[in-house]
Amino acid sequence: MTFFAPNPDTTLEYTQLADNVYASGSLGTILLVVSTDRLDESKGDLYVALGLAKYLRRLGWGIMLWPASRWDEETPAGIDYAIVMIESFVPGLVDPDTRVIAWVRNWVDKWCELPYLDVFSEVWCSSELSAAKLRDCYDGPVEVVPLATDTEIFSPVVGERVSDVVTTTNFWGVGRDLVSVLSDHSTTESVTWFGKNARHLQIPSTIDHRHTIDYFSLPGVYSHWQFVVDDVIEAAAIYGNHNSRLFDALACEALVITNTAVGLAELGLGEVPVYSSEAPLPGIIGDLKADAASARTTAERLSAIVRSRHSWEVRAGVVSATLVAGLSRQSRKAPSPDLLRWATHTREALRRSDDQLSTLRQYHDGLLEQHAELTADRDRLRARAVELTEELNLPIQRRIARRLRPTTDRRRG
C-alpha cells in the first residue's frame, strides 16, 4: 500500500549523504559512526545521523559515514570530529587528531561501563536523566542533545485520517510488551502494524501486520492514522530517551500514545498520552475517541511544539555552535593507544563472528519454516489422497454389493 510519494530531492539528499558525496565543508568534516550506511535496513541510528547531517551540511560541515563494515579500518586523516552513535564501537583506530564524541541515545548503563569512556572528547545524551548518569561516570563535558525530526519530510499529508491505531515498531532482538498490549486492543478495535523482523514475534491474526515500510513513506502512515502507539524499550524508558518515532509522528499531527512519561516534560511534550498496566491502552484510546475534537487539538498543539523546537534544523544550529567552540579546546587522548587498537581489532573480530552466527541462525530459522511448510503441504496431500482413494473405491464397493445381493437373497429364501 502506498500512502505517500516522497519528494525526490529529499530522498536524493539522504542517498548522497549515505554515499559520502558531501565529505568536505568550510567549517570542517564530521565522521558519523553508524551501524550501516544502507537506507533499506531500517536502522534508526542511520536515519538519526542523516537527519542531523543534512542540516549540518547546509551550515558548512562536511559529512562522512563510517558504517560497521569499516570499523576495523583506520579512519581517514583530516576529520575534525567523529560522532559515535553505537556503544559497541571501540575508537582505537580513530585518527589521533580527530575529536571523538559519544552520542548516548540509548543503552546508558552500557555506555557508563565502557573502560575507555575517557577517550571521548565529550558526551552527548538525549535526556537530562541520562546526562546526569553520564556525569557520574565521565568527567568531561556532557551536553543534552535530544533526537528530532526532519520537518521537510515529516509534515501532515492531505487526505482522510482514520481514528484507528497504528505502530511502526521494529524488532531488533529486545523483547517488547507491545505485542500483548496491541493484542488486547485488537480484539475490539482495528490495529495495523508496520515492522521489521515480525517473524520473531508471535503477532496474532487480529492485528493487520504489513511488515516494514520505506522510511520516506512514513509521513503518509502518520497522516493516515490518528493514533500512533510507541513502545520505548526498558533500557531507554528509565532514562526518558525517546526515539525518533515520537517526533516524526507528532510532526505529522498524529497523536502518539507512548509507554513512559519520563523525559516528556523536559521536551515540552508532557501532554503526550501514556499507557501502562494501570492505564491500559484500550481505555486511553476510548477516552480520546469520545472527545475527538479535544484529541485533534492536542495533536495539533504537540505538532507545533515539535516543529518549532525539535526539528533537525534547530538541533543542527545548536550542535554546530558546540562543534565550532570545541575546535579551540584540546582533545582528550587515549591513555593507551596500543591497547585500544588491540581492543578494537578484537572487538571487530568478535562482531564479525556474531554476524556470521546471526546469519546462520537466520538460515536455520528459514529452513525450519520451510520444513514446517513442506510438512503441512505433505499432510494436506496425504489427506487429499485418502479422500480421492475413498471416492474411487466407492463405485467398486457398490458394484460388488450389487453382485453379492442376489446370492444373499437366494440364501435367505
Image (cartoon, rainbow, N blue to C red):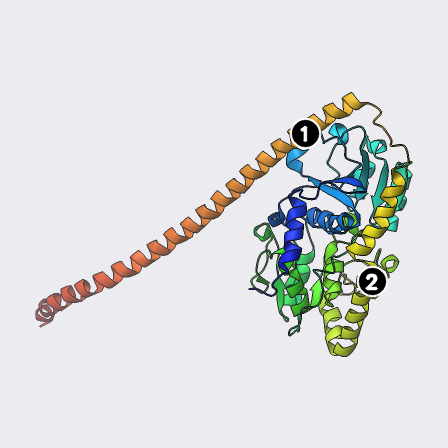
In the figure, residue 252 lies in which quadrant? bottom right
Q: Callout 1, which amino acid?
A: Glu
- The tag on residue 5 is none
Badge 2: how crowded within 10 Å, few (<14), some, or many (20+)?
few
Q: Given the current orientation, which residue lies at the most extreme front position? A: 26
Dot 2 amino acid type: Ser
Q: Judge the density around disc 1: few (<14), some (14-19), many (≥20) Cα neighbours within 10 Å.
A: some
| Residue 14 location (% of width, % of height) | 67, 51
Tell me, yes or no, if residue 101 can be seen here: yes
| Residue 60 vertical placement versus 81 (above, below) | below
Residue 38, image x and y in percent?
62, 45
| Residue at screen point 30% across, 57% down | 386
Residue 173 appears in the picture as rendered: no
Report the number of discs. 2
Quadrant assignment, res 185: bottom right
- The earlier-in-sequence mark between 2 and 1 is 1
* 56, 341: nearer the viewer: 56
Query: What residue is pinned by disc 2?
Result: 308
What distance separates the C-alpha of mark 2 from that of mark 1?
A: 40 Å
Cβ–Cβ below 8 Å for labels 2 and 1? no
Q: Is residue 97 above or below residue 191?
A: above
Q: What mark, if any, has residue 73 been given in the picture?
A: 1
Name which residue lies at 56% across and 38% down: 359
- Quarter location, residue 302: bottom right
* Callout 2 secondary element: helix
32 horizontally vs 203: left or right:
right
| Secondary element type, mark 1 | loop
The quadrant of the rendering that contains the N terminus is: bottom right
Q: Nearer the viewer, residue 82 or 133?
A: 82
Quadrant of the image containing the C terminus: bottom left
- The reply, left or right, for residue 242 in relation to residue 328 is left
Give the vertical position of 4 relative to 357 (above or below).
below
